Image (cartoon, rainbow, N blue to C red):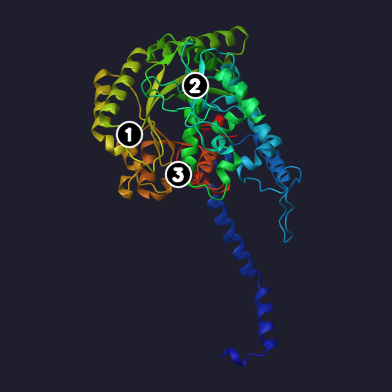
């Protein structure tokens, strides 16, 4: 019968008759229940949930309740569902990290997470465990800490656009005034005097600009909310800004007494965060760091000795206080070098890594290539060198696993225009033990299977990925899908001191 021949009453009669058929409703509910149960049983966390103790189940309910209360709490986030335009102070839970940072720190959920044991921290760069202002205050007290600028600092535009570098030099080093229009920033030129004593810089800065120089330097070293989220910021721009920060940090950390102090203070910070083991990533391409007086240079061997001594001292201190269980496994070092260097330099870096492993077998635990992946070079560019590195380690009966930064990119072309140059292919072929970030892995269904087969773990760094423009906020990060695919993952902070 044509639908046109039904009157409105007949249509309604048919609809309500079918709507009341209990058999269909029961069948639908049962099928839906089976589908939900099958989905839950295939979830990455099903085993943990199904085997949870009664106390763990209660804890999960409490945490879930706190989370949902904080989602709608107007003093934290307060974004209620509805058609009303939110107030200006309302924020999304899981929204922009730097925008929400102060609210997160007031959250009960955050403080519960801080008290939970973390086990290990596997992706953190050596220069970013502690707040830069601590390093700046110590540097201010030194006669041998110097600073240079890429341009004279005469006004606001110079404050905004210059980059600053620190270094420990001999106390008698000839200096220039960075605040003079005739200042020459070329520190490599013959008879150059591009450096200014940091203590004098701070005094003149405060006199000229009536503001705290340490606050300004911190703004140059760490990524701010404006740096990250402003409308005209680009992915390449935020990476350039980030690299400026790492260069600024470098000289504040790389000298003898602070290097020694930093190891102890970093361990204290890890203990406070309930971390029991860590693998730190120093950039070891610079072969020496200066002594505090600038008269001596400490080699890699000297630096590794400092690390071993300070870790041993800290563990003995903890043991004497009956607190060794707070940091029982110590820390190790991943040898890092940039992926941008020429092949002969890379060969030298690999040989240095092997020599350090032979000298410190219980300290050196991996080799990494770092740097923005949308720029050259790809991992495969160093194919011959990396294969030789592997064979050499086998011949010497030492284990230096690859722990590459890989997949920290949206283009995923290994710094080229060709998707076949993705670093994730080389990670598999070179049997990397873990990779840093892995953000783009979901583009590669075959590689996902290889990662699972070879148990290649992904060191997730979701906050870092947001701030370096891979996603806009934590809600857009692909880690839930990565976990659901069965990929092995850890959660890490990457460069916490560089994020305001």
Is the residue under label 3 in contact with that under label 1 (CB below 8 Å)? no
Among the two numbered marks 1 and 3 on one chain, the one whose residue lies closer to the N terminus? 3
Q: On the picture, is 272 further left or further right than 402?
A: right
**Comparing labels 2 and 1, the label whose residue is closer to the camera:** 2
Q: Which residue is mark 3?
A: 236
Is the residue under label 3 in contact with that under label 2 (CB below 8 Å)? no
Q: Residue at x 48, y 30 (%)?
A: 246
Q: Residue at x 34, y 24 (%)?
A: 400
Among the two numbered marks 2 and 3 on one chain, the one whose residue lies closer to the N terminus? 2
Residue 189 in percent (x, y) is at: 37, 24
Q: On the picture, is 220 further left or further right than 187?
A: right
Q: Which residue is mark 2?
A: 176
> Label 3's element?
helix
> Label 1's element?
loop
User: Is 260 in front, or is 4?
Assistant: 260
Figure check: 78 above or below 106: below
Q: Residues within 10 Å of mark 3 (few under 14, many from 20)?
A: some
Residue 154 in percent (x, y) is at: 56, 33
User: Is 328 in front, or is 59?
Assistant: 328
Among the two numbered marks 2 and 1 on one chain, the one whose residue lies closer to the N terminus? 2
Figure check: 224 above or below 283: below
Q: Residues within 10 Å of mark 1 (few under 14, many from 20)?
A: some
Q: Can residue 271 be seen? A: no
Residue positioned most to the bottom:
5
Figure check: 55 above or below 374: above
Q: On the picture, is 390 further left or further right than 203?
A: left
Q: Which residue is mark 1?
A: 431
């Amino acid at each position: 019968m044509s639908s046109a021949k039904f009157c409105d009453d007949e249509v309604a009669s048919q609809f309500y008759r079918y709507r009341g058929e209990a058999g269909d409703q029961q069948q639908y509910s049962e099928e839906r229940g089976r589908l939900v149960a099958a989905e839950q049983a295939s979830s990455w966390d099903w085993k943990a949930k199904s085997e949870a103790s009664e106390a763990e189940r209660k804890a999960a309910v409490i945490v879930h309740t706190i989370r949902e209360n904080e989602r709608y709490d107007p003093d934290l986030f307060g974004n209620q569902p509805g058609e009303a335009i939110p107030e200006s102070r309302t924020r999304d839970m899981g929204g922009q990290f730097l925008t929400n940072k102060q609210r997160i720190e007031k959250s009960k959920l955050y403080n519960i997470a801080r008290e939970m044991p973390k086990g290990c921290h596997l992706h953190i760069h050596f220069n970013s465990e502690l707040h830069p202002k601590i390093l700046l205050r110590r540097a201010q007290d030194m006669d041998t800490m110097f600073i240079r600028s890429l341009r004279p600092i005469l006004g606001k535009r110079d404050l905004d656009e210059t980059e600053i570098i620190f270094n420990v030099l001999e106390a008698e080093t000839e200096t220039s005034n960075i605040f003079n229009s005739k200042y020459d920033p070329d520190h490599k030129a013959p008879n150059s005097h591009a450096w200014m004593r940091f203590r004098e810089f701070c005094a003149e800065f405060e006199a000229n600009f009536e503001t705290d120089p340490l606050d300004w330097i911190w703004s140059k070293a760490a990524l701010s909310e404006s740096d990250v989220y402003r409308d005209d910021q680009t992915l390449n721009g935020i990476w350039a800004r980030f690299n400026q920060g790492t260069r600024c940090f470098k000289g504040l950390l790389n000298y003898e007494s602070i290097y020694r102090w930093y190891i102890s203070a970093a361990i204290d910070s890890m203990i406070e965060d309930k971390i029991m083991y860590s693998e730190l990533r120093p950039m070891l391409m610079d072969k020496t760091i200066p002594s505090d007086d600038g008269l001596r240079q400490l080699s890699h061997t000297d630096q590794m000795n400092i690390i071993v001594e300070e870790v041993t001292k800290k563990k003995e201190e903890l043991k004497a206080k009956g607190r060794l269980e707070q940091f029982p496994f110590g820390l190790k070092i991943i040898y890092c070098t940039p992926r941008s260097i020429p092949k002969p330099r890379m060969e030298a870096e690999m040989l240095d890594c092997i020599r350090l492993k032979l000298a410190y077998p219980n300290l050196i635990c991996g080799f990494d290539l770092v740097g923005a992946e949308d720029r050259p070079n790809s991992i495969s560019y160093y194919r011959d060198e990396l294969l030789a590195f592997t064979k050499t380690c086998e011949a010497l009966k030492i284990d230096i696993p690859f722990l590459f930064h890989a997949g920290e990119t949206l283009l995923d072309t290994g710094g080229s225009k060709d998707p076949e140059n993705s670093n994730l292919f080389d990670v598999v072929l070179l049997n990397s033990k873990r990779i840093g970030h892995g953000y783009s892995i979901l583009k590669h269904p075959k590689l996902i299977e290889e990662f699972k087969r070879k148990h290649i773990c992904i060191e997730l760094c979701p906050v870092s990925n947001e701030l370096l423009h891979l996603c806009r906020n934590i809600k857009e990060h692909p880690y839930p899908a990565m976990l659901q695919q069965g990929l092995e993952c850890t959660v890490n902070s990457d460069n916490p001191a560089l994020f305001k």
